[in-house]
Image (cartoon, rainbow, N blue to C red):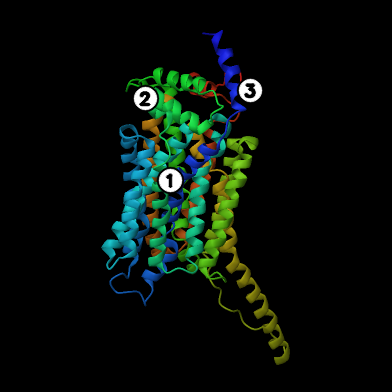
């Protein structure tokens, strides 16, 4: 076997130069349309809630604080349910069909919201779009990774998150000109397009081989790689991975090599949500409205969406250059500084004017007041811009580290034998945390103002900084064997680094 392996590697290397990725890119594009829809539906309340909370709103659809909190947060509850369901569906019907099935609750949810005549229809529709988001979050990354080869797996692996950000930006942009009902109608378009395109795309070769359909898997792999590609080497590697996949037992979960990476992954997903990213994105326009920013809140939201898209591109460029921990440190510090500034800005107390200085003529006093008024006006203008600047810095910091790197680290540190169920637990914890935080955000703001949630996010950023320093290992340029050895032997990398 040792003599055959170099031969297979040489055959694989020679055939890689003949790969054609057109079919692969088309299949990946069809799949990540589901992420576009998820990003779109996540931030749907941002431009919509002001309509439901205004005095001119339809009495049947007008929302109080509790109803608005449920409308913003019930999406995360649906996503948790959809993620758990997708774990079962991925094994029962495969990744491709699971992604296609997510279009059903998505389309039905948008139909209910677009034609809503009461609050019940709005809340149920919002929940169903969350179910679709949870299904796609658990299925699309797996499908994309299974159809990709190693040269483009990293680039295509970042596409789901980038596409979700583009979807959110599209919602913010459409919210500038499109009424809220038509925003819901527009949300159906990417879901329907995804189903139509995926109907012509293949299942993953790994799925087909696990079902014993070798000839079908060979045809699919040749379509994904091109006719000049030597598919046999990759098919053998996939089949070997399937045949040697170990079965984990409950007793094994008590060993450090299993429970440590699982706890670290759960902790990362929990802290990622506790930084406040979901409620900030969901309530972006209402937040800017309460902050008295000079620009209309809907334009500020579009600016933040653009910055979020650019920051993810920067993170993708720096991911393998700066290291995971360095980016997480930078991310935590940027979020801490911005949330601390937002806390102070939102907790300012106006001071009463002092007595006029003595021995001033009326002309001098008037001139002094003019200068003072001008200074105060400039200070107020600068202060009103601060929430926009700090929010942009917060989003940039999140997208630089705690946004994408937690997903990457989870895929790197989780043991392969427990990856399916453990990742499902991590995603469920993430969405349940997002639900609790998003629901409580509205009540905190209504009771204490923006100061209270911003103070909470500031404290969480400090905790995340310490968690990164103490618990998270640096996995850059480390093989999977080295990472597993790190947890098995007690925080040491003893295997020679792979090139």
Cα separation, mark 1 vs mark 3, equals 38 Å
Of discs 3 and 2, which sits in the foreground? Answer: 2
Give me the residue at 47% from left, 37% from top: 144
The disc, 1 or 3, on the residue closer to the chain's N-terminal end is 1
Where disc 3 sits, the SS reads loop
Above or below 376: residue 169: above
Above or below, 15 relative to 129: above
Question: What kind of element bears circle 2?
Answer: loop
Tell me which residue sits at (65%, 84%) in the image: 356
In the rendered structure, the answer to whether residue 278 lies left or right of residue 497 reads left
Compare residues 345 and 174 and report the one nearer the observer: 174
Please rate how many residues cluster around mark 2, counting C-alpha atoms within 10 Å: few if below 14, some from 14 to 19, many from 20. few
Q: In the drawing, what numbered circle is on residue 213?
A: 2
Near mark 3 (Cα within 10 A), the count class, few <14, some 14-19 or many ≥20, is few
- Against 294, is 223 above or below? above
Marks 1 and 2, how far apart in space? 23 Å
Are dots 1 and 2 in contact, CB under 8 Å?
no
The quarter of the displayed image where residue 68 is located: bottom left
Which of discs 1 and 3 lies nearer the camera? The answer is 1
Q: Mark 3 sits on what residue?
A: 499
Residue 267: percent from the left, percent from the top?
A: 44, 38
Q: Is residue 77 left or right of residue 351?
A: left
Q: Residue 406 at what x, y percent from top left?
A: 50, 39
Cα–Cα gap, marks 3 and 2: 35 Å
Q: Which mark is residue 166?
A: none
* SS type, badge 1: helix
The structure residue drawn at horizontal position 38% and vertical position 19%, both measured from the top left corner, is: 246
Circle nearer the N terminus (3, 2): 2
Which quarter of the picture shows residue 391?
bottom right
The residue tagged 1 is: 197
């Amino acid at each position: 076997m040792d003599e055959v392996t170099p031969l297979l590697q040489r055959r694989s290397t020679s055939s890689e130069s003949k790969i054609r990725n057109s079919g692969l890119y088309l299949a990946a594009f069809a799949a990540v349309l589901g992420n576009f829809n998820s990003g779109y539906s996540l931030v749907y309340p941002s431009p919509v809630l002001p309509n439901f909370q205004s005095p001119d709103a339809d009495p049947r659809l007008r929302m109080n604080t509790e109803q608005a909190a449920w409308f913003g947060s019930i999406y995360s509850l649906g996503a948790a349910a959809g993620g758990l369901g997708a774990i079962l569906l991925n094994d029962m019907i495969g990744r491709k069909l699971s992604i296609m099935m997510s279009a059903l609750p998505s389309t039905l949810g948008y139909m209910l919201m677009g034609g809503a005549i009461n609050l019940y229809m709005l809340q149920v529709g919002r929940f169903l779009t969350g179910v679709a988001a949870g299904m796609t979050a658990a299925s699309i990354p797996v499908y994309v990774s299974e159809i990709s080869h190693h040269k483009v797996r990293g680039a295509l692996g970042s596409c789901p998150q980038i596409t979700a950000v583009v979807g959110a930006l599209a919602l913010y942009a459409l919210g500038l000109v499109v009424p809220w009902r038509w925003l819901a109608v527009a949300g159906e378009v990417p879901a329907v397009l995804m189903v139509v395109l995926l109907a012509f795309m293949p299942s993953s070769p790994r799925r087909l081989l696990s079902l014993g359909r070798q000839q079908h898997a060979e045809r699919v792999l040749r379509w994904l790689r091109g006719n000049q590609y030597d598919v046999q080497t990759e098919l053998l590697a996939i089949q070997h991975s399937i045949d040697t996949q170990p079965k984990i037992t409950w007793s094994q979960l008590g060993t450090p090599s299993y429970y440590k990476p699982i706890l670290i992954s759960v902790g990362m997903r929990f802290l990622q949500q506790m930084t406040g990213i979901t409620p900030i994105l969901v309530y972006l326009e209402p937040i800017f409205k309460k902050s008295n920013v000079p620009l209309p809140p809907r334009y500020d939201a579009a600016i933040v969406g653009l910055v979020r898209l650019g920051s993810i591109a920067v993170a993708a460029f720096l991911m393998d250059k700066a290291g995971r921990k360095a980016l997480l440190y930078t991310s935590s510090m940027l979020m801490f500084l911005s949330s601390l500034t937002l806390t102070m800005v939102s907790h300012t107390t106006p001071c009463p004017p002092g007595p006029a200085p003595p021995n001033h003529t009326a002309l001098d006093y008037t001139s002094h007041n003019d200068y003072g008024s001008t200074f105060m006006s400039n200070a107020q203008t600068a202060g009103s811009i601060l929430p926009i600047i700090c929010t942009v810095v917060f989003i940039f910091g999140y997208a630089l580290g705690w946004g994408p790197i937690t997903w990457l680290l989870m895929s790197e540190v989780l043991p392969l034998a427990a990856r399916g169920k453990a990742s499902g637990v991590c995603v469920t914890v993430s969405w349940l945390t997002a639900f609790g935080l998003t629901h409580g955000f509205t009540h905190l703001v209504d009771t204490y103002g923006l100061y209270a949630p911003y103070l909470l996010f500031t404290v969480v950023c400090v905790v995340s900084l310490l968690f990164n320093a103490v618990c998270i290992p640096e996995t850059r340029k480390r093989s999977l064997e080295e990472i597993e050895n790190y947890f098995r032997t007690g925080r040491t990398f003893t295997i020679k680094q792979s090139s």
